[in-house]
Image (cartoon, helix red, strand yellow):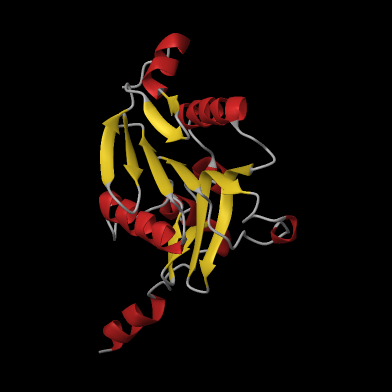
């Protein structure tokens, strides 16, 4: 009995997860950055798990540059860099690229807090959160549904491992090879595979 008491007495307490490792909050549940376990075990730093990969950064640059060529800045605003999106008191999400109508994202809505109005189009490049409890596909569908219900018209997921783009609207969800032309908006099409081929970048 004494030995059992001693074992219980020295049992380590579970480590608290610091708030800065939270990637998103979805339906009241925190989603932590991939690799957060290594951070709380002092095997990695927070900076090591929060940075984008090389291929993610290249694709973000390509898409932002593509959008900049045709976007009417009087009609639309483009937010990047994991732009925060506040849906309600239980859900704070982020978008890699978000295209807003300026009639919706008015100047008074831009401040030091998360934006609380829906983007017209949201683009995500891979999944940066640890979503084992949901599975990656479950997370994609859940976040997509939340955003469409919030008022977003189109959500696109660029998945680098599969080399596909998931395009979701309220009418349908389809998965398209990134080597094909994909319409973003108003007849403007992008082609990630073609761009990477031109740059000599091979994704394995």
On screen, residue 40 versus residue 175, left or right, reads right
Asked whether 73 or 13 is in front, the reply is 73
Query: In the image, residue 104 lies at what x, y percent?
Result: 62, 56
* Circle count: 0
Residue beneath the point at 64% across and 43% down: 75
Depicted 8 relative to depicted 58: above or below: below
Q: Is residue 183 above or below residue 105?
A: above
Q: Residue shown at 39%/16% (left/top)? A: 194
Give the x, y percent position of residue 111: 73, 59
Using the image, determine if residue 24 lies above or below residue 204: below
**Is residue 194 shown left or right of residue 47?**
left
Residue at 43% over, 46% down: 128
Q: Residue furthest bottom?
A: 1
Q: Is residue 24 visible?
A: yes
Quadrant in which residue 30 is drawn? bottom left
Instruction: Quadrant for the C terminus, please.
Output: top left
- Which x, y percent locates residue 42? 50, 51
Above or below residue 80? Residue 68 is: above
Q: Residue at x 37, y 20 (%)?
A: 193
Res. 162 visible in picture? no
Query: Considering the image in quadrants, where does the N terminus appear?
Result: bottom left
């Amino acid at each position: 009995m004494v030995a059992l008491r001693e074992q219980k007495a020295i049992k380590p307490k579970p480590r608290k997860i610091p708030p800065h490792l939270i990637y998103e909050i979805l339906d009241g549940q925190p989603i932590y950055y991939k690799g957060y376990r290594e951070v709380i075990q002092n095997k990695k730093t927070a900076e090591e798990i929060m940075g984008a990969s090389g291929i993610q950064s290249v694709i973000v640059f390509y898409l932002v540059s593509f959008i900049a060529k045709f976007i009417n800045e009087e009609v639309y605003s483009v937010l990047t860099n994991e732009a925060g999106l506040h849906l309600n008191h239980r859900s704070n999400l982020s978008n890699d690229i978000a295209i807003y109508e300026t009639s919706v994202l008015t100047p008074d809505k831009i401040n030091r807090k998360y934006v609380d109005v829906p983007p017209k189009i949201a683009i995500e490049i891979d999944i940066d959160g640890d979503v084992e409890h949901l599975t990656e596909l479950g997370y994609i569908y859940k976040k997509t549904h939340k955003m469409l219900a919030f008022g977003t018209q189109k959500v696109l997921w660029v998945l680098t491992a599969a080399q596909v783009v998931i395009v979701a609207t309220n009418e349908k969800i389809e998965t398209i090879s990134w080597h094909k032309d994909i319409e973003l908006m108003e007849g403007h099409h992008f082609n990630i595979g073609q761009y990477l081929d031109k740059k000599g970048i091979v994704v394995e």
